[in-house]
Image: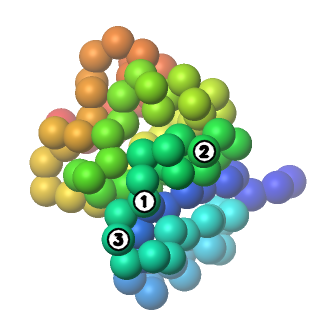
């Protein structure tokens, strides 16, 4: 069975990378600046998971670009970047 594909919009700590890499096929954004919106939309097309920061909006536009997306993990304090209305109902809400 193949590993789920995940896009991480930033580098993670080594311990987190190790855990993720054991069970997922993770593509990491390696540049120091945040990825442009168009780049995020392109890279999530075939992904089942997204790991992002507050700088990346998770909304209907992103979900339309990522039909296979099952989870969006937000590495942040708060979740103002996640539109919890509309199409986001297709993702399971795991936080507050």
Name the element at disc 2: helix
Farthest residue toward the bottom?
Answer: 14
Farthest residue toward the top?
Answer: 86
Relative height, residue 29 to residue 72 (above, below): below
Name the foreground residue: 95 vs 59. Answer: 59
Q: Is residue 8 left or right of residue 76?
A: right
Relative height, residue 73 to residue 21 (above, below): above
Task: Give the mark nearest the N terminus, 2 or 1.
Answer: 1
Task: Give the mark nearest the N terminus, 3 or 2.
Answer: 3
The residue indicated by pointer 2 is 42
The residue indicated by pointer 1 is 35
The residue indicated by pointer 3 is 33
Tell me the distance, in whole angstroms, between the alpha carbons under discs 3 and 2. Answer: 17 Å
Within 10 Å of disc 2 (Cα), the crowding (few <14, some 14-19, many 20+) is few
- Badge 1 vs badge 3, beta-carbon distance below 8 Å: yes
Name the element at disc 3: loop
């Amino acid at each position: 069975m193949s590993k789920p594909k995940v896009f991480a919009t930033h580098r993670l700590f080594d311990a987190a990378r190790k855990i993720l890499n054991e069970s997922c096929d993770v593509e990491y954004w390696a540049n120091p600046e945040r990825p442009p919106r168009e780049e995020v939309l392109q890279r999530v097309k075939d992904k089942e998971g997204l790991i992002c920061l507050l700088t990346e909006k998770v909304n209907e536009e992103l979900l339309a670009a990522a039909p296979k997306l099952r989870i969006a993990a937000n590495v942040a304090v708060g979740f103002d970047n996640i539109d919890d209305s509309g199409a986001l109902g297709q993702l399971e809400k795991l936080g507050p």
